[in-house]
Amino acid sequence: MSDNLLELYELTKVFHGTNRVHVRAVDGVSLDIVEGESFGLLGESGSGKSTLARLIPRLIEPTSGEIRFNQVDLRTLSNRQMGAVRKEIQIVFQNPFSSLNPRMTVRQLIAEPLIVHQRISGPALDDRVRRMLGLVGLGSEQLNRFPHEFSGGQRQRIGIARALILEPRLLILDEPTSALDVSVQAQVLNLLLDLQKKLGLTYLLISHDLSVIRYMCDRIALMYLGKIVEQGNASQIFKSAQHPYTQALLQDVPSPDPDQHMLERVILVSDSGFNHWSGRGCRYAPRCSAAKIEACSVTEPPLIEVVEGQSAACHLRRPLRPG
Amino acid sequence: MSTGAAAYNHREPLVEIRDLHMEMVTFDGVAKVLNGINLTLFPGDRLGLVGETGCGKSVTAMSIPNLVSQPPARYTRGEVRFRGENVLRKGHSELRELRAKHIGVVFQDPMTGLNPVFTIKQQMSDAILSREDALSAMVPFRGWLPSGRQRRRKAEATALALLRRVGVPEPERRIHAYPHEFSGGMRQRVLIAMAIAGRPDLLIADEPTTALDVSVQAQILRLITELVREINLTVLLITHNISVVAQLCNRVAVMYAGNVVESGTMRQIVQSPKHPYTRGLLQAIPTEETLRGGLSGVPGAVPNLLAPPSGCRFNPRCPYAQEKCRTVLPPTYELEPEHGVACVLYEGARQVAQEGTGKQAVNPSES
Amino acid sequence: MASITSSRGPIARWRAEHASYIYDLRRGVRRFTRNRLSVVGLGMVLTLIVIAITAPLWIPYPDDVYGSVHMDARLNPPTPTHLFGTDDAGRDVFSRTIMATQISLEVGIIILVVAISIGVTLGAIAGYFGGWTDEVIMRLTDIMLTFPGIFLALAITAALGRGITNAMLALSITWWPGYCRLVEAQVLKMREEDFVLGARAIGAGNARIIVRHLLPNLLTAIIVKASMDFGFAVLGLASLGFIGVGVQPPQPDWGAMISTGRHFIPASWWYSTFPGLFMFFTVLGFNLLGDGLRDLLDPNAIVRQ
């Protein structure tokens, strides 16, 4: 337990809209990430995964819950103390086109974190920037170029360099390759694996793309409408998912194997109006094709361990250890 | 409303693109976007046009209803034949008729494809009416005349039927809604409904599922498959996702930087790809069997179309590149029936076309 | 984009390293020169600047500018010695018109600098911090914008008294709300962009984000607006001069000259006409330049994928 780098406990974020509409974007999420592992967060749009990514370094303020990084609850820190912690937790964003200031050169972009935190300058600064650039596979002749001169994959490398220059321990990757072509995606994913080995990083990888998560992660959690519905060992879950949502998801992902005639299998209910939770019962119930029991529409199912190393939040599953 | 399928011989190609070259004039120079495309679609085909950023798949498809703005685009060679006639030479009214009755287009982004200030009913009725009578439907205030009102009512009934067909629940209620009240998947269904309203011969779908969640994507793909059967639709699907193609299409054409590098039946491409780029592309997709660290991509990046590599445009990134790859664009060789590859590695095989799809044998001395 | 780093001297190396700046500059110049009107505008503006700077060196009757009066040579029509004729005090209209150019441009610059400083600062603060700060600042801006420009300036000079300094102050106060609104809207939009989030993620403070990240992206919008406004700022000054509350005699001012010259139309038409032409020339020149700059610097054209 003590080598958990990050522990989230009942983390919640509620957005208040007009007409007293509250969106519980992240609702009571608890998970642990061990140092050195790659933890995958899989979810579709509206699941709250991006919000969660921004909650952890407190880019958005949580409504309630705990974020324990290195045993310290980040919510108790002042702005200044938080600034120091920011060095340790960095984030790479999805869109390589909008996440880099178009008016800053590559050198300025990568150097900025160092300037903000450590007051290095001159040749020492330059040296570190160049080394970082080399680590992500770009050459120093690129230093004075602007982001718009690079391809999507290269821009993402710049984003990674910028995030890693402070030598963080935890790197949050919010859909790092979703905007990239598939051949470039492979390059960037391999780069990430390489860097993880070289620099001893811990990854929280967030994506809607199951094949990316499967390739990169050891343990995963699936989010649906703000809650974790299944969590545990990645290969185990892919082989035998316990939660109906996971099962449906695995079924719907198209594979390049034409012999899996997925389209001929029974299609579930249509998708209209499923982005809201009525406030009672299981959030997935309206779409769930499993045989529902009464509890499904009355109480929220807790996340409990149902198989060794795998937890699911579903009334239809029996806990591994009763009580 | 026309029923396109019965109007001509099914052995004849519906779409034939021959040696199409296209340039785009930009501030920085002239981009050579299409470098001799050969593509054929037969009635009933579901062709997947696969490629990455900048390969020209969208402009190729949009050339069929001649929807590419010229300028800045400029066709310098070749022709695009739809039902035997060269689309690039048609006049405005002929093109409008073509787009209204024979070709339906579904664009990528369901968010922007619908006008946010009109209800679904208004937009669908407009679409249906304009398909019936491409020219006069646009005359303002015609809808207020009694004959106009009657036509409107008929169009609304058709719209309702279409919505039901594409799987929108409670269509009587939802037809009065605005686009923002629909989810992405629903919006895409509405766009599909509008595209097939005129019972077109050809449906062009440009990345129809990219912006959608996986579960919704599956439903949309299934909808398209059903429509293909029901109304004899021919589909040209543009995508960068080979997995989607594997589920929906019977034929595939792979494009890279303005050329079709490989084409064939879906099984041929997905199970025995021959072109180094196609192979690289398939190997870049992580599957269940891919081990951690075992993914190989395609090194390098797509070329700048303002100054593309000479010869085969893939040569800077190709692990098998030879001297001649840098000088001459390889012709297309037919490895087996229907399977064509544009690569010198297969020189021994029968040469089919200057980059063809394997369906027509063009005399190489023609130009 | 391949760049070949030459092993020749430091100049060649600098050029290679900064290839992107040079490239962008060249492209920019090329794009700008395509539009003939913009080039004309640029020419007009450059002419005015040159005139303004060098005026004291070559005006034929420097004394006439500040005070000497030649009552025997009143209201003479244009002649080779007095290109624009003389005014009602016998002074050379040409020299005075040219000198007024210098004064007008100087004052124009000062007005805009002050207005931009105030407006951009307030706008950035309002847009970035939102909430009450935004409300308060923007309501103030709205109030100021409800006054037709010239009346506001008039009211202020009436309160403060005549004179060039007060005129400058009045006009600056009239112009800053425009920039405030422009900047506030842009900052509000940019605040949500990923690159701002990225800056916060690496620990940058608010000040740094505003100055280092947001403002540089606003630069083009501000430059475009400033170049278009300049002509109107000069016009504003001339309007105040026309009424008599701007530049005070004997200092030459186009507005004042046109105003006084009114009484002598149509007989001594040259008195009002030439200053009027210069004003027209100025406003038109800056407008054309501003249009051209806007087309050039339009962000949609700069960020190309």
Image (cartoon, coloured by chain):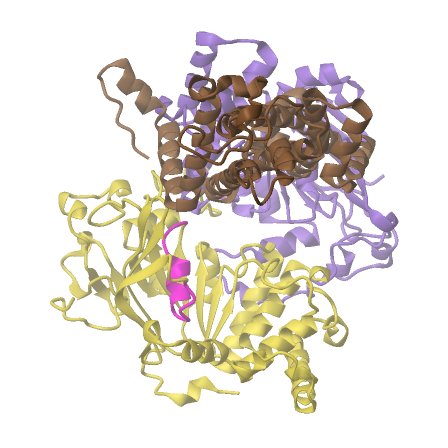
With B342 as the anchor, is B3 left or right in this view?
right
Residue nearer the viewer, B62 or B282: B62
User: In the figure, the yellow chain has which letter?
Assistant: B
Q: Residue furthest left?
A: B365
Observer able to see residue A87: yes
Q: In the image, residue C210 lies at what x, y percent?
A: 64, 25
With B107 as the anchor, is C7 left or right in this view?
left
Q: In the image, residue B179 lies at what x, y percent?
A: 68, 63
Q: In the image, residue C111 lies at what x, y percent?
A: 64, 26
What is the span of residues highlighted in magenta in the rendered image? B53-68
Residue A39 placement: quadrant? top right
**Is B54 in the magenta?**
yes
* Residue C270 in the image: above or below residue B347: above
Residue nearer the viewer, B29 or A318: B29
* Residue C136 in the image: above or below residue B107: above
> Residue at the spot x=33%, y=44% of the render?
B304
Q: Residue furthest bottom?
A: B147
In the figure, the shade used to draw chain C is brown
Q: In the image, residue C183 lies at what x, y percent?
A: 66, 34
In the figure, the shade used to draw chain A is purple
Quadrant of the rendering where the C terminus of chain B is positioned: bottom left
